Amino acid sequence: MTHLSDDPSEEQWIDDEAGRIVRPYVMTRGRTEPSRGRIDLITLVVTLNPATPVDPGLGPEHHTIVRLCERPLSVAEIAAHLDLPAGTVRVMLGDLVDRGLIAIQEPARETDVLDLETYKAVLNGLRTL
Amino acid sequence: MDSVRSDSGPAARANGAARTKLPTAIKILIAGGFGAGKTTMVGSVSETRPLRTEETLTDRGVGVDDLSGVEEKKTTTVAMDFGRISIGDAHVLYLFGTPGQERFWFVWDELALGAMGAVVIADTRRLADCFPSVDYFERRGTPFVVAVNCFEGARRYDLDEIRMALDLGPAIPVVLCDARQRESSKNVLVALVQHAMQTRSTKEPIAG
């Protein structure tokens, strides 16, 4: 069954997907939660091992993710490229992390405040754009 | 820190790869009424055409402090347009156009979490359309700027008139822009990041 964490804000029930679009639900073999913690829309993903092994647990979409993420991409970008809901992509990312094929960024921040260096870097970057 | 000889075993190597390769992702929200120019701004300043993603979000009820009676959760799928701006190797900025319809307000908490700030695009022909966005970010304490999108044929207003009409505090920047122009949209983002940085440095003392 679906694994639930203690934090209610981490619950992401997306079972409605099953009624609306069957295919993404099938791709995740019915799972609606990734095997790893919170994965935000801007969580970045990078491929660690591009030579994806033959694995009955991995579908063509998994392989596409591994190929796409040789350059770091966010969950939102992966979902857009695959034309799949972000929730479906999250579950597949969990599969790939479990197999050591991709790395994902640290869990999303729970506060809005970033460190001062980040603001400065973004500001300078935007100005020289 | 000695990070040179940390390479032992696949786990350590995986960690090392993640640490060296992955930039910090930053989220900025682009809000405003329907047709105000959200996707236009995302597109003009991003390095690629706007992409679209579908996110399933949980309705956690309107009253954030009210913990009772929220047993009946609902989920809603919303489509969002977004774009990317790479800043050096260390940072990636993601701009998310927020879903326009009022019935999606409840999903904003999830989107706004961890955001550096927000741009509220105002269309002077329909200024009231951006009231809900202004209200939302004010209440939530998300730093935001109001960008007045100068549509052709629309009457030009004085920035102070707009500030008054929106009942904005003096600290909230109001800037004119043309969402179609990359340089103009870029300046809006610069204004936002500056404002967010100032808000951040004054945030803690205000708490008491």
Image (cartoon, rainbow, N blue to C red):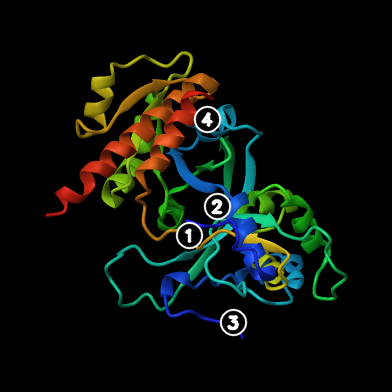
Mark 2, residues whose alpha carbon is within 10 Å: few (<14), some, or many (≥20)? many
Judge depth for marks 3 and 1 and give the one in front.
Answer: 1
Residue tagged 4: B41
SS under mark 4: helix
**Residue highlighted by disc 1:** A108
Question: Residue tagged by mark 2?
Answer: A42
Measured in 3D between alpha carbons, the distance from the residue under mark 1 to the one under mark 4, in whole angstroms, is 25 Å
Q: Are marks 1 and 2 in contact (CB under 8 Å)?
A: yes
Q: Position of residue B26 (x, y in %)?
A: 48, 46
Q: Which residue is mark 3?
A: A2
Instruction: Assign the N terminus of chain A to one quadrant of the image.
Output: bottom right
Q: Chain of mark 3?
A: A
The picture quadrant where one finds residue B56 is: bottom right
Q: Can you see residue B99?
A: no
- Mark 1 chain: A
| Disc 2 residue type (three-letter) | Ile
| Residue at (55% x, 57% y) in the render | B3
Element type where label 1 sits in the image: loop
Place of residue B123 in the rendered image (x, y in percent of width and height, measured from the top left): 41, 27
Q: Which three-letter amino acid code belongs to the residue tagged 3?
A: Thr
Q: What's the distance in space between the residues labelled 2 and 4, CA to CA? A: 19 Å
Camera-near label (1 vs 4) is 1
Rendered view: A26 above or below B153: below
* Amino acid type of the residue that numbered disc 1 sits on in the rendered structure: Ala
- Give the mark, 3 or 1, whose residue is nearer the N terminus: 3
